[in-house]
Image: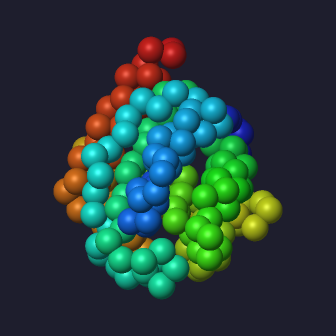
Amino acid sequence: MSIPAIPAPSMLVLSCICSQSFFEGPSDHLQKLQNLFEKEFGQIWYQSPCLDFNRTTYYEPEMGKGLKRYFFGFETLVARNRLAGIKLRTNELEREFLAEDQKRQVNLDPGLLSMENLILATGKNFTHRVYLHSGIFAEVTMIYQKENFQTLPWTYPDYSSEPILGILHKLRLQLKAQLQKGK
């Protein structure tokens, strides 16, 4: 018989894909978004350099060409059962930054990084996704085995790129330090 136990908290990781128009205009939308992230999710521990988002054209019809991506890692660890609520809130934040034509300028994908895997939240069902609640599903996107992140058949191609793997390793080391400090 298994004995239910609450798992260790995870690091909230947020992927932010932005349109070129997001950076144009009278104000710094990215800074406003970062301020909202900190208000909603706590202190940002890590922000990646700006990465080109060019492995797929999936978002181009809505957001245009020349998309950029940032990853954020948050200092405050979160309970794993919060993932659906966080995704619902990031959906609201996306709507707050709609362009005048009501198209998205930013796509926010939250995930939870644990010592054993990376789980992303989505509103899209598929065979390998588990329903959480309120229209939100969870996907184990990568697993950590043999001292490395391992992709799965459905892992987004860019997650296996060297820049993103380097970011995930850096975040995982910080998570490990935080969990050891908390014991």
Horizontal and vertical percent position of residue 148 = 26, 49
Quarter of the image for residue 38 reads top right
Residue 163 in view: yes
Q: Give the tally of numbered discs.
A: 0
- Looking at the image, which residue is at 66% across and 48% down? 86
Residue 126 vs residue 103, the one in the foreground: 103
- Looking at the image, which residue is at 29% across and 52% down? 50
The vertical placement of 16 against 112, above or below, is below
Horizontal and vertical percent position of residue 137 = 66, 65
Residue 106 vs residue 76, the one in the foreground: 106
Residue 44 vs residue 163, the one in the foreground: 44
The quarter of the picture where the N terminus appears is top right
- Is 135 on the left or on the right of 129, as rendered? right
Residue at the extreme right of the image, as rendered: 134
Residue 13 in view: no
Colour pattern? rainbow
- Looking at the image, which residue is at 44% across and 65% down? 21
Horizontal and vertical percent position of residue 60 = 43, 80
Residue at the extreme bottom of the image, as rendered: 61
Horizontal and vertical percent position of residue 19 = 43, 66
Residue 17 vs residue 154, the one in the foreground: 17
- Is 39 on the left or on the right of 52, as rendered? right
Residue at the extreme left of the image, as rendered: 162
Quarter of the image for residue 88 reads bottom right
- Looking at the image, which residue is at 65% across and 73% down? 102
Residue at the extreme front of the image, as rendered: 26
Quarter of the image for residue 76 reads top right
- Is 142 on the left or on the right of 86, as rendered? left
The vertical placement of 6 against 13, above or below, is above
